[in-house]
Amino acid sequence: MSSDAEAGGLKDAVLIVDGDVLSRHAIADYLRHCGYSVVEAASTDEAMTAITELSLGIDVILCDVAAIGERSGFELARWVRENRPGLEVRLAASAEGAATFAAELCQTGPHLDLPYEPGAVIDYIRQLRAARDRV
Amino acid sequence: MQTISIRTRELPPANAGRVLVVEDEFLIRMIVSDYLREIGYTVVEACSGDEAVAVLRSGVLFDVVFTDVRMPGSTDGLALLAYVRATQPGLPVVVTSGHLLPALALAGGAVEFLAKPCGLEQVAEALCAATSGR
């Protein structure tokens, strides 16, 4: 699946929020190799800085539900949906975090699995782009 | 917050090497890392000395480490420097700080010290010099 925008060479800017440096780097590196612009945040605090203080043109946020910071991953997602309605945010959870995630699922929507499966992440980003292009 | 000014420079060849950037200030880490990627480095970003140690223990190989000194957690930049000296004596470490005296970092085994605020070009030159003999 490839949207018109991607076919034209435009790729989304992705903010990765993950307190595990190895997990964060792995998916960030993969996305960079695929041509995406990536910002790495080690906490929700850093993510808030990226969202509110920078003109980075972030299109998609991938956030570990267990991300550290003043806000939890859920709270960050909620804040983004309330204050940045055009910015897509997808929570990611490990098997251990899935139970906690399920309790909040009705408010936060579907999620990605941790560790990230690179193909699933790319598919998700492309689906978002395709949906935006249709609007 | 410390700032690093942006200056333009001629871009070196791609594949300049693999660098571990260790900086707790998000914006500085992002600006430095993005710049180093632009000029051909492969960059791994760590937000603390503890994260840096985790990366080094994972077996990822680097050509150079670029680290701040004052960072949260149990491993500051000097402790990270000591860890690298003990575990990978051949891995050069470039230290940057707005507080530390250069002599302290150099005595600990750093190959270069950059006082903050420093320019991105200075960072690139220091990393290039640090890796030129490898």
Image (cartoon, helix red, strand yellow):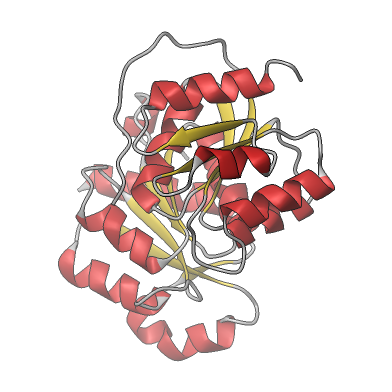
Q: Is residue A45 above or below residue A129?
A: below
**Residue B66 makes an appearance in the image:** no
Q: Look at 35% across and 77% down and name the residue there.
A: A70
Choose top left, top right, bottom left or bottom right for residue B108: top right
**Residue B71 makes an appearance in the image:** yes
Residue closer to the observer: A56 or B97:
B97
Q: Is residue A133 above or below residue A120?
A: above
Q: Is residue B10 above or below residue B74?
A: above
Q: Position of residue A79 (x, y in %)?
A: 24, 72
Q: Look at 53% across and 34% down and name the residue there.
A: B113
Q: Look at 43% across and 65% down and name the residue there.
A: A43
Q: Look at 21% across and 57% down and name the residue there.
A: A52
Residue A112 placement, left or right of B18 = left
Q: Quadrant of the C terminus of chain B?
A: top right
Q: Residue furthest bottom?
A: A103
Residue closer to the observer: B37 or B94:
B94
Q: Position of residue B45 (x, y in %)?
A: 54, 46
Q: Position of residue B67 (x, y in %)?
A: 55, 44
Residue closer to the observer: A92 or B38:
B38
Residue A129 placement, left or right of A1 = left
Residue A123 placement, left or right of A108 = right
Q: Position of residue A76 (x, y in %)?
A: 32, 72
The total of numbered circles placed on residues is 0
